[in-house]
Image (cartoon, rainbow, N blue to C red):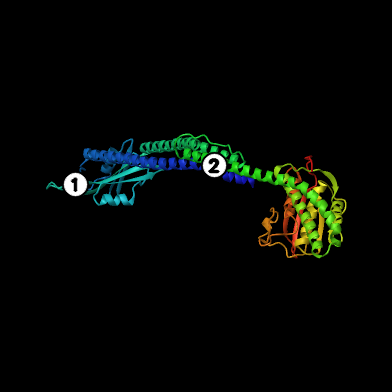
Amino acid sequence: MTQWRRVGAWVSGLRVRLVLAFALLGVTTTVAVASGSYFQARNVILQQAQDAAVMSLTDQLTKVYPIAQLPPTQDDLELLAQRLSDRESFAVVLYRDMRAQGGSEITDPLTPELRQEVRDGRIAWQRVLLAGQPALLIGTQLALDRPDGTSRPSGVEVYSVRNLVPEQQSIDQLATRAWLTGGLSLVLAVLLALLSARGVLRPVRDLSRAARRLGEGDLSTRLTVRGADELADVARTFNDTAGTLERQVGELRRLEADARRFVADVSHELRTPLAAMTAVTDVLDEEAEHLPGDAGRAARLVSQETQNLTQLVNDLIEISRFDSGTARLALDDVDVAAAVTATLRIRGWLDRVRTELPPGVVARLDPRRLDVIVANLVGNAFRHGAEPVSVRLSADPDWVTIEVADRGPGLDPEVLPHVFDRLYKADTARTRSEGSGLGLAISWENARLHRHGERRGSLVAGNGTHGGAVFTLRLPRETADTGGAR
């Protein structure tokens, strides 16, 4: 299929179209000019041969005319036929039922149409094929002088049959030359088309390569402007556009880097006071039961919000690592079923989750990041879905697949494309939600961090056939060891 696509692209390419256009123009012009010249020359040659034959017959009749008596004898007709015949032509003389022919063995070369014209008293001619060769038939009727100086038809029909082979050979030579001229014109048209295509396609190819480099991120790409034609205007426009894009992207990158650095700096700066606040909230948690009324509720609220803020800061720090490219895997040979079971047990979910975890599935993964992904998916199912929540493990030689499903209302089709966006909220009126709002985004990044060759981990959201949301995690069983800190 790829080969056919390449052939189709080559056939529909600009070079082929230019060559075909020039070739078609050359062939059309050559055919028109050569055909016109051929037919005009052919008519001229045949007309000259015809006129010469008519004049020759007229001269010969003048020399042998008149016939001594009417009706003529067979000998008279034989003698007239012999006198009118030569190497280039032969004659046929008719009078009523008598016939004489000289100089050829071809019998009955005359056509009814020609004989009718001659009987009507006119000089007539006709081009025919005799024995496969072109010939010219010329016919006339001898006149008989009257005593009063007038003449009347004698009834003696004289026909001259002339071979047109020399003229046909000249016409064939003209046709051959016309075809040769057409072939040379076609070759010249193709050469001109190739030269023109080269001149047109070179800047187009340069533009294509430059656009490809620009699309790959090389914003310093520029074209060399040659000449002052339309292609030069396109090159200048490309350079102006590339320059504007480079400036805008540079500004966006600077703003993005500033934003990332700001988030990372703020997150790190908040860790110290948050550590102190966490220590205080631990004390408040111990004393909250002994505090009266509003004081107890306030203590528990402060403790919960402090935990939420700590989780948010940790998630922001994790996101900043992904954005800066410093996130690395710490790989180990992991029993996936055991790792998932441990994640559920630590969080007290083991009795609430239905599991299908076949033993013996070992993969080279980052166990901490697998724990984060599974915990986020199961926790998300409890918060936004409905029980029962299920976790199912499957594997093949190349992939490990973990599916987390619930029986809740599922995901709205408008929400699906944005499930893994950072801080995305399906309900815009909901200003607060349990959790940091970054869990699914972090899980998606952790999944993609696992890769082996062209195979890269993925996390996909969807809806089950019986309702509820379904999140499918696929990780390559062998992941390249990139090293580095967690």
Point out the residue furthest to the left here: 148
Viewer-proximal residue, 46 or 398? 398
Asked if marks 1 and 2 touch (Cβ < 8 Å), the reply is no
Where residue 160 sits in the image (x, y, percent)? 30, 42
Residue 102 in sight in this render: no
* Position of residue 338 in the picture relative to residue 136 (left or right): right
Q: Give the number of the mark in front: 1 or 2.
A: 2
Residue linked to disc 1: 144
Q: What element carries label 2?
A: helix
Viewer-proximal residue, 71 or 41? 41
Q: Distance between the residues labelled 1 and 2?
A: 103 Å
What's the amino acid at mark 1?
Leu
Where residue 27 sits in the image (x, y, percent)? 44, 41
Where residue 82 sits in the image (x, y, percent)? 29, 39
What's the amino acid at mark 2?
Thr
> Which image quadrant: the C terminus?
top right
Marks 1 and 2, the one that precedes in the sequence: 1
Query: Which quadrant would residue 166 be assigned to in this image?
Result: top left
Looking at the image, residue 211 lies above or below residue 297: above
Viewer-proximal residue, 432 or 220? 432
- The residue at the point 32 percent across, 44 percent down is 137
Q: What element carries label 1?
A: strand
* Position of residue 293 in the picture relative to residue 213 (left or right): right
Mark carried by residue 404 = none
- Image label count: 2
Residue linked to disc 2: 244
> 10 Å neighbourhood of mark 2: few (<14), some, or many (≥20)?
few
Residue 138 in sight in this render: yes
> 10 Å neighbourhood of mark 1: few (<14), some, or many (≥20)?
some
